[in-house]
Amino acid sequence: MTDLLLDKYQDIVGENVINNLRQLAEPLRGTKVVHVNSTRDGGGVAEILHRMIPLKQELGLEPSWEVIVGDADFYQCTKYMHNTLQGNRFEIPQPLLKRYEEVNQENAERLRQQLEEADFVFIHDPQPAPLLNLCSGRRGKWIWRCHIDVSRPYRPVWKYLRSYVEPYDASIWSLAEFAQPLRHPLYLISPSIDPLSEKNIELQDSELQEIIKQFGLDPDRPITSQVSRFDRFKDPLGVIQAFRLAKTFVPLQLVLAGGGATDDPEGEEVLAEARAAAMDEPDIHILLLPSDAHRTINGLQRISDIVLQKSTKEGFGLTVTEAMWKGKPVIGGNVGGIRLQVHNHHTGFLVNTPEGAALRIRYLLTHRDKLEEMGQKAHQFVLENFLITRHVREYLTLMLAILRGTEERIELQ
Amino acid sequence: MIDPFAVKDCALIAIATGERANDLRELRDRLDTTRPGCIYYHFWGGLLRPSFDDPEYQNDFAVWAYHGLHDRFLAERLALVDPTDFYDLEDLRRELIEIIEERLDENELVSWTAAHQPFQFIRSQIVVFDTGIRISEPEELKELIPRLTVGSVFYHFVDARRRTPEKNDDFSEWLMGFADGYDELLEQIASLDPYFKSLTELRAQFAEIFKEYMYT
């Protein structure tokens, strides 16, 4: 097998980064690594795994990816779990919790041999968390990767889940603020984007022009956009308000693009609210895109002058990373992982109100040199910190660290 | 015969301890008991973290005093603490506690001000790996230095101070082994303060010092 994928990444991140990966991977050659999550398509976790698995393979590890299979009650339960772990106060009905346990039992029967033989098992999020207890013959290290913000969970649900995740050898969190204390090391690893994916690859100018035409945008006036689910925490109404305030100073168009709202009752509600707030204003373009419209999203981010992510609550905020990769300054809510990425006057601006967002839109559109400079810095910042190569490096480092126990210094020969 | 200089690289991996401080009094209490690795990380870990240089507040304690507590007095005092001035992390810990206690004594209100964001205590593990690159003569440093990764700069300049008996950088330790003396060069390298610079700045300054030395 050729190093085709690594070569492609090397063209982007440079030789040193790839050499580092090879050196870190060397002691892990032949290591069996299994990732388990709950979906093969859709969502950030699946997106990352699609790329991370072949990369680890090229580096000489033996990775595999398994997906647990459940029914409607199981997913209802894990959705409740997701919401309550993020702070919603809701008692999950006992029959649903029972179904959660049964589905994990069924999946354990199917996956037991593979999981017990693995050197490392990465379990993503709460859905497959009970698998560890169900694999008593396990010989490898088990790591729970929590992608959500559990800083203020609904305590009874966290107490229930904790009994499953506490026995893991370690857990991984995106930010220290998101974590709950557990009796094992809590590693901090930011997520990443893949520069070679449809969502992030370079696009031809002709394709961008096509997108401008397709959505009826005016190529001669500035565009600001927010790409995210229609969710109240993403504050689409605040974005519309900021747009209106900014438009009194500078000519402007707004694109609010999101997907996946049709299978989410609350999403439909928020979409309807956003449409009502837009009041058919021709310069506000609300786009409901299919979940696989990666290339369109890529194009919309690229044709934007400024990208907004005015969330009032946010996980890591990979849409921010995507926009920055495309050389766009981001005006983001002062929350969650956005704070790690958006640095005032460097890569964009952190704001707390629609007024703050409007002020910064006006500033950037009237200081084009600053807009360009911040966009370039944003691209460079992502290149150095938030690409998948850094993510893989940290996974490899973590595996080596866990193999050597808790010692502070690990010297590889 | 001096051993060749072995170029190493490193990666830090951050680990949340789960310890948090919601106000200054809690920060003082946690600082008293937290493991030395946390103090190390909050002073030096920033060099390898995604960030832009903020020379006013170089360590995480000062940043938190400013952004979390909005206490400029304390932020300024903490920002001035240079960890290279202290023999070890225990001395550094004592100095931090001293500064915080002084602040608590002079302003009672500070004791009860809840932070905008809690301070999260983080430690790290360092994984060191051999790049396979070796140099035998000091002159080869001229080519080597500009090509060093930031991980290598961190390992040989910052981490070295924890490993070497004289709390030196690795390059100086190596150069000291040569009989024909590099005193002037060593003096100039010693004048580099790794704390108040980014790793790329440090690399550039080291390269400049070496280049000038070679041409004089």
Image: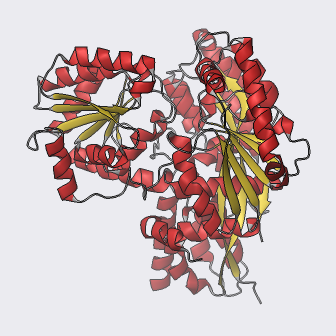
In the visual, does B87 lie left or right of B191? right
**Residue at screen point 61% across, 72% down:** B186
Q: Depth check: give the residue in front, B58 or A141.
A: A141
Q: Position of residue A92 (x, y in %)?
A: 68, 13
Image location (x, y in percent) of residue A101: 77, 26
Q: Is residue A219 above or below residue B201?
A: above
Total marks placed: 0
Q: Is residue A94 left or right of residue A1?
A: right
- Residue closest to the far right: A137
Q: Residue at x 43, y 17 (%)?
A: A266
Residue B173 image-quadrant placement: bottom right
Can residue B95 be seen here? yes
Q: Nearer the viewer, residue B98 or A324?
A: A324
Horizontal and vertical percent position of residue B216: 46, 84
- The colour scheme used here is secondary structure
Q: Residue at x 85, y 50 (%)?
A: A116
**Relative image position of residue A258 (x, y in whole percent):** 35, 32
Q: Is residue A105 above or below residue A110?
A: above
Q: Is residue B87 visible?
A: no
Residue B94: quadrant of the picture: top right
Compared to residue A239, the image places residue B145 above or below, namely: below
Q: Quadrant of the C terminus of chain A?
A: bottom right
| Residue plotted at (19% across, 57% down) | A205
To which quarter of the image does residue A309 belong? top left
Toward the bottom, the furthest residue is: B1
Q: Quadrant of the N terminus of chain A?
A: bottom right
